[in-house]
Amino acid sequence: MALVEIYRDMGNSNEIRSDFHFSKVKPLNDCFESIKKKLEEYLNTIQISQEKKNRQIEKRLLEYTGVDGVSSGKKMFLYFNYTNTIDLYPNWGFDDKIQLIFIHGKLGDKSNPIIFGYGDEMDSFFNQIKQLNQNDFLVNMKSYDYIKTSNLQKLNEFLNEGKFTTKIMGHSCGISDRVLLNRIFEHQNCDRIKVFYHETENGDDYSDKIKEISRHLGQKNILDLVCPKGISEPMIPYIKQTVKVKL
């Protein structure tokens, strides 16, 4: 992380907190903002339509919530993408047992702006960086953006309602979302984690995925929490479907 490197450079210099070092942070933030804008521009070029709906994916999203096949009655889809692809599937507006949260914002939605930044605030350097009393260092920390909407509050309410199974589809589980994933995985009501892994010609990423998950755990043991591979399932590859019309 470039910000941590700047902080380390400060510690190794005789000019601690000098203007020379602090001047590196604003250009970094400006560069990050530019990348964010370019990302939004690119995402706006992607066309999402009902023609791209995949029935197999829809079936998977609507299936039971429990590992053992027993539905718990309620579901929350915590969506990390920015586009409206998920809107192709369950009919969110007519099912009060299903919640959809665009936790990192939604493209084109001013009330839920895109969150694009760093989320490993469990890093040992984070508390030290906060103590610098320089807000420029904290501009792109995700937690400060989460507070701007009620999304995190809604997530917390769901987590506190009762036992739940976490199903992971498509998320890398990398440390960029460490604080948020730790909140879910380490919650007392998180009963199991089921991984949907990617298959390739050379194997799959199941082992890599559970290693990433382990980095978000503190008190809990991954052996007690993550479903074994025999219970886990591969992701459904996206295949554009065509409708045959009989003439």
Image (spheres, rainbow, N blue to C red):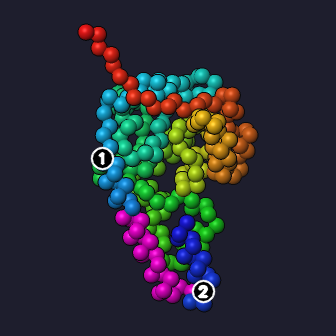
- Give the amino acid type for the residue marked by disc 1 in the picture: Thr
Position in image of residue 245 (x %, y %): 29, 14
Q: Is the magenta stretch mostly helix, strand or loop?
A: helix
Q: Residue at x 34, y 51 (%)?
A: 42
Q: Residue 73 carries which label?
A: none
238 is higher (above) or lower (below) than 7: above
The one nearer the camera, 126 or 210, is 210
Neighbours of disc 1 within 10 Å: few (<14), some (14-19), many (20+): few
51 is higher (above) or lower (below) than 205: above
Q: In the rendered image, which residue does mark 1 sit on?
A: 45
Residue 21 part of the magenta segment = yes
Q: Can residue 28 be seen in this view?
A: yes
Q: Residue at x 35, y 40 (%)?
A: 84
- Give the amino acid type for the residue marked by disc 2 in the picture: Ser
Position in image of residue 180 (x %, y %): 54, 51
Residue 243 part of the magenta segment = no
Q: Which residue is drawn at 64% across and 36% down?
A: 203
Q: Residue at x 31, y 33 (%)?
A: 49
Q: At numbered mark 2, what does the secondary structure look like: helix, strand or loop?
A: loop
The one nearer the camera, 3 or 198, is 198
The one nearer the camera, 140 or 27, is 27
Task: Determine whether, in the image, residue 13 is placed left or right of residue 30.
Answer: right
Range of magenta residues: 16-34
Q: How many marks?
A: 2
Q: Residue 13 carries which label?
A: 2
